[in-house]
Amino acid sequence: MEREKVTIKKLQEMKARKETITMLSAYDYPLGQAIDRAGIDMACVGDSLGMVVLGYEGTVPVTMEQMIHHCKAVTAGCKKALVVGDMPFGSYNESKKDAIRNGNRFLKEGGADAVLLEGGERVADIIKALVKAGIPVMGHLGVTPQTVAMQSGYKVRGTGAKEAYQLLREALILEEAGAFAIELECIPELVCKEITERVSIPTISLGGGRYCDGVFMITYDALGLFERFTPRFAKKYAHLLDEINRAFAAFVEEAKEKKFPQEENVFNIKEEEYRQFCELVKANL
């Protein structure tokens, strides 16, 4: 039986029956296809592509054009998972008008089903405006890479009672604003447990522990394709960079030693056609 398209309603039903929601990041057509084949529920076209695909030091330089470009590629291959486009820095924090225009682009041009944006109370009105405009929004609390400089680095959020309470308060604000789900990044799991139990919308853990409604991983971490650093909350399910290095080394060795290409890798011309070709060369060059 062919899998049905994942919808916001289905995610809500999964939370209700305590079925874990799965989410991976995706940046291109093959990853989009792989996510669907694996039965992943959600695909996030994350601005993490700035670091893992484009080689930036952080996510702030990522542009709308880059996000739309990659979103198109993912949605070309990903037809069943719910695809969320991550709104990059500068695409929603200047005005509601800008946020709606860029949110529309993710859905109309990128083919996404929804958008994701960082922040709590400070973006509540923007979320309300997006939802009113018919653009589904996923919230994001905890470590928010776009504003990490304001947070004094990539440190776990909510380790103190007051900060933990503020995260819970902001989760409730995001729910009230109309967000259909919330990503909780680098927050103590007991705090995430409390948030998950107190909001009616799904919570998705990226370093938020075991009590959220769903689990999110950056695909390049899971595949072992990004070696600059590995977050504590990540798990390498494969070591593809090692395989790539071995494959490239083997190619170089075979090419240098004239072992590749072989007969089965080349195209030939019929003997008579080659003879005529040589005559043409001799007569005209």
Image: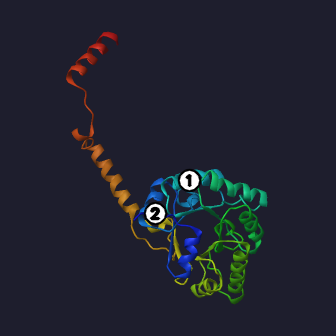
Mark 1 lies on a secondary structure that is helix
Query: In the picture, which quadrant includes the C terminus?
Result: top left
From the top left corner, tell me how far across and down residue 133 is, in percent.
73, 61
Dot 1, crowdedness within 10 Å: few (<14), some or many (≥20)? Answer: many
From the top left corner, tell me how far across and down residue 254 is, in percent.
27, 47
Q: Mark 2 points at which residue?
A: 35
The picture quadrant where one finds residue 30 is bottom left
Q: In the rendered view, does 267 fall on the left or right side of 95?
A: left
Please report the residue visible at 45 percent of the width from the left and 68 percent of the height from the top: 222
Q: Name the residue under label 1.
A: 70
Q: Is residue 42 visible?
A: yes
Q: In this view, does 234 lie above or below 105?
A: below
What is the C-alpha distance between the residues marked 1 and 2?
15 Å
Q: In this view, does 200 lie above or below 58?
A: below
Q: In the rendered view, does 111 fall on the left or right side of 4?
A: right
Q: 62 or 113, which is in the foreground?
A: 113
